[in-house]
Image (tube, rainbow, N blue to C red):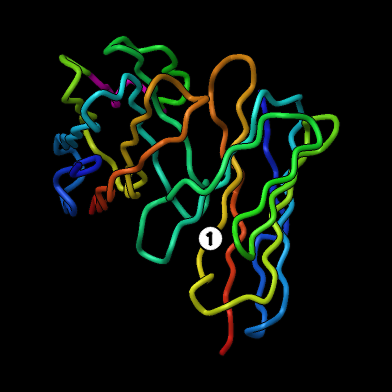
Amino acid sequence: DAGVIQSPRHEVTEMGQEVTLRCKPISGHNSLFWYRQTMMRGLELLIYFNNNVPIDDSGMPEDRFSAKMPNASFSTLKIQPSEPRDSAVYFCASSLMRASYEQYFGPGTRLTVT
Amino acid sequence: GQQVMQIPQYQHVQEGEDFTTYCNSSTTLSNIQWYKQRPGGHPVFLIQLVKSGEVKKQKRLTFQFGEAKKNSSLHITATQTTDVGTYFCAGETSGSRLTFGEGTQLTVNP
């Protein structure tokens, strides 16, 4: 199994631009999580899907952030417009059923907004 | 909301010394998970504890879950340079949401 796949691995963009991060979970996993990691705030859960349905989006910082999961094998996290404070490493993770199960993290996308 | 606190934030040890990180929750947890993140890498699942007072071992690593299911610890015996990284606990409440602690960054001097 290839594990959780994320793209791009690195993204550098200018303030105000739209950024789209992509994730392919492990086949057969029903839950998908988006996390953001920074030195200041640590590892934060942004949103959690179960069976492609958003269950908990209370961690989404503001309306500039949106996430979709159109099918079981693909999810996107979009930031529009991006701001320098969005610079962070964004991880996607998947698990077999829900948060109770071990989560498999992707390699992350390092986002830099200048 | 739920908070999961970890101490210490940083720990420097000489190779061969023991290491312990502690995790405390403001609420009772359904279960607790531990992850390790190597520098530049992503978190990797180590173990899950579910039962009150549970103790699990993985070679030199010992994990404990408190009787009240509000605290946990990870102890590494005789650290090696391969143990370097940040160790996170993550607690789940009945709301089925994992909350990660701030992590303990371990460095091991050879």
Q: Nearer the viewer, residue A8 or B19?
A: B19
**Residue farthest right in this picture:** B67
Parent chain of label 1 = B
Percent coordinates x, y for residue A73 in the rendering: 16, 24
**Which span is picked out in magenta?**
A61-68
Near mark 1 (Cα within 10 A), the count class, few <14, some 14-19 or many ≥20, is many
Residue at 35%, 14% in the rendered image: A50
* Label tally: 1
The answer to which quarter of the image holds residue A49 is top left
**Residue farthest bottom in this picture:** B110
Percent coordinates x, y for residue A59 in the rendering: 46, 26
Residue at 73%, 62% in the rendered image: B20
Pick the quarter of the image with the C terminus of chain A. bottom left
Q: Amino acid at mark 1?
A: Thr
Pick the quarter of the image with the N terminus of chain A. top left
Find disc 1 in the rendering and name its residue.
B86
Q: Is residue A53 above or below residue A49?
A: above
Percent coordinates x, y for residue B105 in the rendering: 58, 64
The answer to which quarter of the image holds residue B3 is top right
Residue at 42%, 36% in the rendered image: A103
Residue at 20%, 34% in the rendered image: A23
Q: Is residue A53 above or below residue A15?
A: above
Reply yes or no: does residue B90 show up in magenta.
Answer: no
